[in-house]
Image (tube, rainbow, N blue to C red):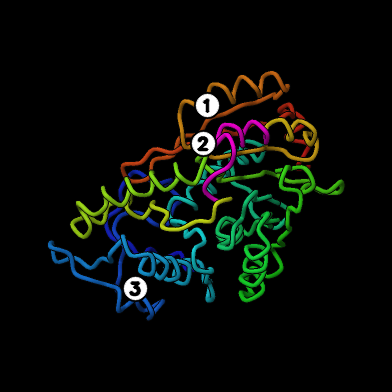
Amino acid sequence: MNTEKAQKTAKPTLHPRNLHQGQYDFVSLMKACPELQPHVITNPRGELSINFSDPQSVLLLNKALLAYFYDITFWQIPEGYLCPPIPGRVDYLHYIGDLLSESFQGEVPTGSKIKGLDIGCGANCIYPILGSRSYDWSFIGADIDSLAVKTASLLVKANHNISKKISIRQQKNKQHILTGMVKPSDRFAFTLCNPPFHASMEAAAAGSQLKQKNLSKKAVNTLDKAKSELNFAGKAHELSCAGGEIAFVKQMVTESATLQEQVCWFTCLLSKGENVAPIKKLLKQCGADQVKVVEMAQGHKISRFIAWSFLSEQKRLAFFG
């Protein structure tokens, strides 16, 4: 992995280990991914940028970031599927690394013995890719969508440096989240999930329109990281579910209670701060031993994930022994 930073002045917003600090160095990124070059523009301040409201430009920026920083030579997703922002996604993994370090005398553990389960890996397979390249962790990626599973499997197979570290599973029972994806012989250091935030596709569309409206007001006037947090596509199951985020995470919590000896830490992103309290209440009812809410700052955006374990501190230490 190329650890040289392709950004300029660092900003104290992303995780300290995040390689994507400051503004993008488009000269280096265009060298890593020549396809990006026709999409690079000059903003009113005379700086190189892209049109962040153009899905193809954002896709190619992702390809360049993956190529330059993580030595991923092939990455493509089907039209209409979620195109995730790299800086924010890898931040989640860095904070999970901090969580795991509590069981390793403050050092972030590396190597394939640290195994993660990504619930809803999508066609982009971004968390397993970034986690395997950043920390050499191994992953199972799970998704309900057959094309997403096929695409993610292709991405893994096409990149030799991750092909033996990531496996993809299809969740064929759409009523379940964790159930069926954790086999009896599995032991995961952690799970992670970017759940569907909206209760309906209408709500998702309204949120997207608002983001696009806000972005159009400052389209090329800034390289603010907040712009790269926009999702310009996504299938229905990626963006919405009955009951929205709160219903999805509550079901995940309930299912996790049946798998408490097989997973050290369960984690899940929460887009809405008001969902933290009811999830914590349910976790207490389910007997979780430890519950943590970790906030992450990405540009002007504050996001968070909730982490819980049913294992005592002593059992968490023994889990990796």
In the image, is residue 270 part of the stretch drawn in magenta? Answer: no
Q: Position of residue 298 (x, y in %)?
A: 37, 45
Are the two marked residues, 3 and 2, in contact with CB atoms closer than 8 angstroms?
no
Q: Is mark 1 on a helix, strand or loop?
A: helix
The Cα atoms of the two marked residues, 3 and 2, are separated by: 34 Å
Q: Residue 28 carries which label?
A: 3
Q: Is mark 2 on a helix, strand or loop?
A: strand
Please, what is the three-letter code of the amino acid marked with disc 1? Val
Query: Which class describes the residues within 10 Å of circle 3: few (<14), some (14-19), or many (20+)?
Result: some
Q: Where is residue 277 in the image (x, y as percent from the top left)?
A: 53, 21
**Left/right of residue 150 with respect to residue 202 in the rendered view:** right
Q: Main secondary structure of the magenta part?
A: helix
Which stretch did the figure color magenta?
A: 238-252
- Nearer the camera: disc 3 or disc 2: 2
Q: Is mark 3 on a helix, strand or loop?
A: helix
Please, what is the three-letter code of the amino acid marked with disc 3? Ser
Residue position for label 1: 276
Q: Residue 242 carries which label?
A: none
Are the two marked residues, 1 and 2, in contact with CB atoms closer than 8 angstroms?
yes
Query: Which class describes the residues within 10 Å of circle 2: few (<14), some (14-19), or many (20+)?
Result: many
Nearer to me, 165 or 235: 235
**Left/right of residue 296 with respect to residue 320 in the rendered view:** left
Give me the residue at 78% from left, 42% from top.
Answer: 321
Q: Where is residue 96 in the image (x, y as percent from the top left)?
A: 57, 43
